[in-house]
Image (cartoon, rainbow, N blue to C red):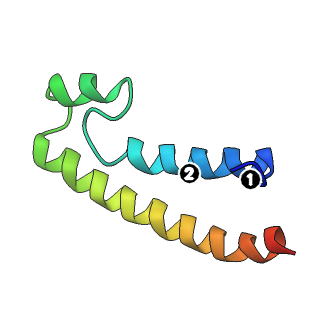
Amino acid sequence: MPEIPLPVFCLMVGAAIGLGSILTPYATGPSPIYYGSGYLPTVDYWRLGAIFGLIFLVLLVITGLLWMPVVLL
């Protein structure tokens, strides 16, 4: 991807990492501690992951739709 500007590439990678880090109990550093210690029950952990994942995805799509015309000009 040599033609992609570095700031755009960093935003794309950051968005992908952000989405992946909220979907599973072991995706980020502190997540296994919250999950394994019983701080959040398993059902709540997955339910909240799905809710926040959906919110993150909607915001990502809206931001992307607004941002792409600026990048492509």
Q: Is residue 16 above or below residue 60?
A: above
The structure residue drawn at horizontal position 73% and vertical position 72%, both measured from the top left corner, is: 68
Task: Tally the numbered discs.
Answer: 2
Helix, strand or loop status at disc 2: helix
* Residue 39 at x, y percent in the picture: 20, 30
Of pointers 1 and 2, the one earlier in the residue sequence: 1
The type of residue carrying mark 2 is Ala
Q: Is residue 15 above or below residue 31?
A: below
Badge number at residue 30 = none
Residue 9, given in percent of the width and then of the height, sits at 69, 48
Left or right of 16, for residue 25: left
61 w.r.t. 3: above or below: below
Label 1 sits on a secondary structure element that is helix
Q: Quadrant of residue 3?
A: bottom right
Residue 71, picture quadrant: bottom right
Residue drawn 59% across the image and 44% down it: 14
Question: Would you call the spot at circle 2 few (<14 residues within 10 Å), some (14-19), or many (20 or more)?
Answer: some
Residue at the location (31% across, 48% down)?
A: 23
Q: Nearer the viewer, residue 65 or 38?
A: 65
Nearest the camera: 35 or 9? 9
Tags 1 and 2 in contact by the CB under 8 Å rule?
A: no
Distance CA(mark 1)–CA(mark 2): 11 Å
Residue beneath disc 1: 8
Graded by Cα atoms within 10 Å as few (under 14), some (14 to 19) or many (20 or more), the crowding at tag 1 reads few
Name the side, left or right, on which 24 lies relative to 1: left
Judging by the rendered image, the residue that carries numbered circle 2 is 15
Side of 18 relative to 54 (left or right)? right
Amino acid type of the residue that numbered disc 1 sits on in the rendered structure: Val
Q: Position of residue 53 (x, y in %)?
A: 38, 58
**Residue 21: x %, y % from top left:** 40, 41
Q: Nearer the viewer, residue 36 or 69?
A: 69
